[in-house]
Image: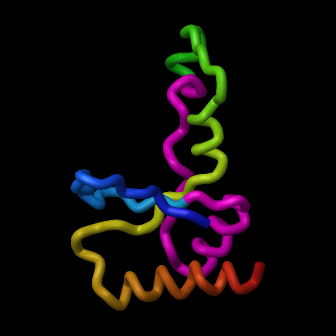
Amino acid sequence: MRFQKVSEHVEPNNWLHTMWVENQRPMIDHLLKNGVQCRPFWVPMHQLSMFKNCTFVSEYHISQQVYQHCISIPSSTNLTDSQVEEVVRVIGQFISLG
C-alpha cells in the first residue's frame, strides 16, 4: 500500500485521501464490511459511455492502473479523531490478515 508523495514546495489541500493497493477489491470489501465507506478511484473518462466514440490515445494506460488499484477513503473536515483512528485500525486489520 502506498500514498501519493507530496513534492517539495507543494502545499496539498488534503481534499481526497486515496491509497494505492495491490488487492483493491478485497480491501474495499473488507472496509465496507467493517463500516468504512470507500470507493474505487474515479472511472477513467475514456471508459464513460458519453465518451465511448471519442479517440483515446495512451501508451501506458496510467488511468486504468490508477482505477484498478486506488481506493478513496473517508476524508472530510468533519471527521472526528476517533473516526480517523477507526479507519486506520480497519485498514491495519486488513493488512495484518494478508
Left or right of 2 in this view: 61: right
Q: Say above or below: 86 vs 54.
A: below
**The C terminus, quarter of image:** bottom right
Image position, residue 51 (x, y; %): 52, 17
Say which quadrant the N terminus sits in.
bottom right
35 relative to 20, above or below: below
x 31%, y 87%: residue = 81
Q: Nearer the viewer, residue 20 or 38?
A: 20
Q: Residue 28: which quarter of the image? A: bottom right
The magenta stretch is: 20-48
Residue 45, percent across and down? 51, 27
Place residue 17 in its image quadrant.
bottom left
Which residue occupies the extreme right position in the image?
98
Front residue of this view, candidates 54 and 14? 14
| Location of residue 12 (image quadrant) | bottom left
Coloring applied to the structure:
rainbow
Q: Is residue 4 left or right of residue 94?
A: left
* Residue depicted at x 65% and y 28%: 60
Residue 50 as seen in the image, left or right of residue 16: right
Residue 65 is inside the magenta segment: no
Tell me if residue 89 comes above or below residue 16 in the rendering. below
40 above or below 46? below
Q: Residue furthest bottom?
A: 82
Where in the figure is residue 63, as x and y percent of width and height? 57, 35
Q: Position of residue 18 (x, y in %)?
A: 47, 59
Residue located 57% across and 78% down the image: 91
In magenta stretch: residue 46 = yes
Does residue 10 appear left or right of residue 64 in this picture?
A: left
Q: How many callouts does the rendering have?
A: 0
Which residue is painted at 60% across and 14% down in the image? 57
